[in-house]
Image (cartoon, rainbow, N blue to C red):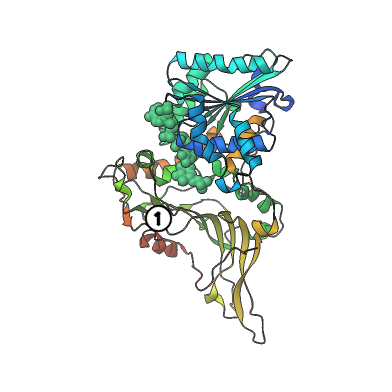
């Protein structure tokens, strides 16, 4: 969202014109072996998200066993079977485990091999290369290219050494073309300086067309629908500006805490974990954030995690107001709100319109028009509006125009974000990944605030787990102009 509205630049879908190179030039003709290497295969993300996403792609025929092999790599000493046992239970929820699914699980696991090694020495990566090559050789007896996709499900601290090891030891060697691509997870850096340093280190080894910076929120169905909604509908054309919109809220709420990830989380906090990346995509012309437009919180019990120091001021909740200095959005607060251990779980974008001038039906008190995109759970797009209460009286009531996906698209399975993004990586489509300049822009917005928090000049207020977060955050919203609708709540329709 920028000067004239949305300016999410579309990245190339097949190949990047700026960085066309031999390795990346033949995505559209993909055939031959595809090796997917999950580095950090022993970890939380790998078992909960990466392997299940690969399994779903496999089940849908996107990873044909005649072409694909999957390697797990980590330092932990494990056999192939031990890795398989670790991930098996995450591949499909037990309630879906029909004999057909169980057979698919077993066939999928047949494609998985584990290699153990360190992240900074040649030996492990040479061994990995040997294993990959063995399969490539088997599969490419007929002419075909070799594709190697390295997924770094690892802490960012090891990205530079892992990328160096891949570059030195594990690049695609096929004479028939193919590619080597690297997927890196967030958080990409801790502030502007460290992110730029990381970008330069990786940028010296791989060009931009080989690097896929994943932000899985960009793979969510409703996020992908945003551009279509905004630009393919006449409704929004005259309304999408400061004359009509009072405030915009982008909200992420979780009803659980850090759950064993306290060691990681305490180093980063909610702004780096969620707001800087998932909630912020390409907001340009943002004014510096003012302390009085920030509320930080930390839930009581957060420090019970033995990995979290008793002195921690790390926020597990934050409300931050961004102000955009341009013709379209001057004066409209963009309220970013994210919290852990709250009273509900949801992610949504809520655009609240100004009051109707005149208020001839005296219904202003009932609530304002809102346009809401509910990302999860219960994906929906709905518009809150005032209508005549059905009946003999001429009275008004709040209602909604509701596009609830479960109801409207019955039987349609919405792909998991990771599933879609991994498939994009295989296809060489970078449009839903974070470009280096976007990343820089995002860090530029938040780094001064983060440094003030790190120095302790802003304190996290305590809040009880299972609540809305600190009361001060609601007060800030009210001050910014958000008017809560009382007595009406949108309920996802049941079938
Ligand atoms: N978990 C999640 O829900 C999400 C995670 N992410 C991101 O994905 C990446 C991986 O996350 P996650 O799986 O939770 O992380 P883990 O802490 O589980 O780490 C993954 C693996 O990396 C190795 N590892 C851990 N710490 C270190 C270290 N200090 N030095 C070297 N190796 C280490 C371990 O493998 P071994 O010791 O066997 O080598 C571990 O199994 C991170 O960048 C994270 O921010 C992003 C979104 C969600
Ligand atoms: O990246 C992260 O995202 C998850 C939330 O992802 P979702 O798809 O389940 O909404 C969050 O729990 C985690 O802290 C963060 O690192």
Left or right, 66 with respect to 342, comes to right
Left or right, 332 with respect to 303, comes to right
The residue furthest bottom is 392
Question: Percent position (x, y) of residue 470?
Answer: 36, 59
The residue furthest front is 99
Question: Percent position (x, y) of residue 111?
Answer: 60, 27
- Tell me the element at label 1: helix
For this rendering, which residue is in front, 238 or 83?
Answer: 83
Residue beneath disc 1: 293
Q: Is residue 214 shown to the viewer in this render? A: no
Question: Percent position (x, y) of residue 437?
Answer: 53, 34
Taking the image as four quarters, which one is ligand 1 found in?
top left
> In the rendered view, would you say 378 is above or below 486?
above
Residue 178 quadrant: top right
Which residue is pictured at 59% across the width and 42% down the height?
417
Q: How would you rate the neighbour count of disc 1 (Cα within 10 Å): few for under 14, some for 14-19, many for 20 or more?
A: some
């Amino acid at each position: 969202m920028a000067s004239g509205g949305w300016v999410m630049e579309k990245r190339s879908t097949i190949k990047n014109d700026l960085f066309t190179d031999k390795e990346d030039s033949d995505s559209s003709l993909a055939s031959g072996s595809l090796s997917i290497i999950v580095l950090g295969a022993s970890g939380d993300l790998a078992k909960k998200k990466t392997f299940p996403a690969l399994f779903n792609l496999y089940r849908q025929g996107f990873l044909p066993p005649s072409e694909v092999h999957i390697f797990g790599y980590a330092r932990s000493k494990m056999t192939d079977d031990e890795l398989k046992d670790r991930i098996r239970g995450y591949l499909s929820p037990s309630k879906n485990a029909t004999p057909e699914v169980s057979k698919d699980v077993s066939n999928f696991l047949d494609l998985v091999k584990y290699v153990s090694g360190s992240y900074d020495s040649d030996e492990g990566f040479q061994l990995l290369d040997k294993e990959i090559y063995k399969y490539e050789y088997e599969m490419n007896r007929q002419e075909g290219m070799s594709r190697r996709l390295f997924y770094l499900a690892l802490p960012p601290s090891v990205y530079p050494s892992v990328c160096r090891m891949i570059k030195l030891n594990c690049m695609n060697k096929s004479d028939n073309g193919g590619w080597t691509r690297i997927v890196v997870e967030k958080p990409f850096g801790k502030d502007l300086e460290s992110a730029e340093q990381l970008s330069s280190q990786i940028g010296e080894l791989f060009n931009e067309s080989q690097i896929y910076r994943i932000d899985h929120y960009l793979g969510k169905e409703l996020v992908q629908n945003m551009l279509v909604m905004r630009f393919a509908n006449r409704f929004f054309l005259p309304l999408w500006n400061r004359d009509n919109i009072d405030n915009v809220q982008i909200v992420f709420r979780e009803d659980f805490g850090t759950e064993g990830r306290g060691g990681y989380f305490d180093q980063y906090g909610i702004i780096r974990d969620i707001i800087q990346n998932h909630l912020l995509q390409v907001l340009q012309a943002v004014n510096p954030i003012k302390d009085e437009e920030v509320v930080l919180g930390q839930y009581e019990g957060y420090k019970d995690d033995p990995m979290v120091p008793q002195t921690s001021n790390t926020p597990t909740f934050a409300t931050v107001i961004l102000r955009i200095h341009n013709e379209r959005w001057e004066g409209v607060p963009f309220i970013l709100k994210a919290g852990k251990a709250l009273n509900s779980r949801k992610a949504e974008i809520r655009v609240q319109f100004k009051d109707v001038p005149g208020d001839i039906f005296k219904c202003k008190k009932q609530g304002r028009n809102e346009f809401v995109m509910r990302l999860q759970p219960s994906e929906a797009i709905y518009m809150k509006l005032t209508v005549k209460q059905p009946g003999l009286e001429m009275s008004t009531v709040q209602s909604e125009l509701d596009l609830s996906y479960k109801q409207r698209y019955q039987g349609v399975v919405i792909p998991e974000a990771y599933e879609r993004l991994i498939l994009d990586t295989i296809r060489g489509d970078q449009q839903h990944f974070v470009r280096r300049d976007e990343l820089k822009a995002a860090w530029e917005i938040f780094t001064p605030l983060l440094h003030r928090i790190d120095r302790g000049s802003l304190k996290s207020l305590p809040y009880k787990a299972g609540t809305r977060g600190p009361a001060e955050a609601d007060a800030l919203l009210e001050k910014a102009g958000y008017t809560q609708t009382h007595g009406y709540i949108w309920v996802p329709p049941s079938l």
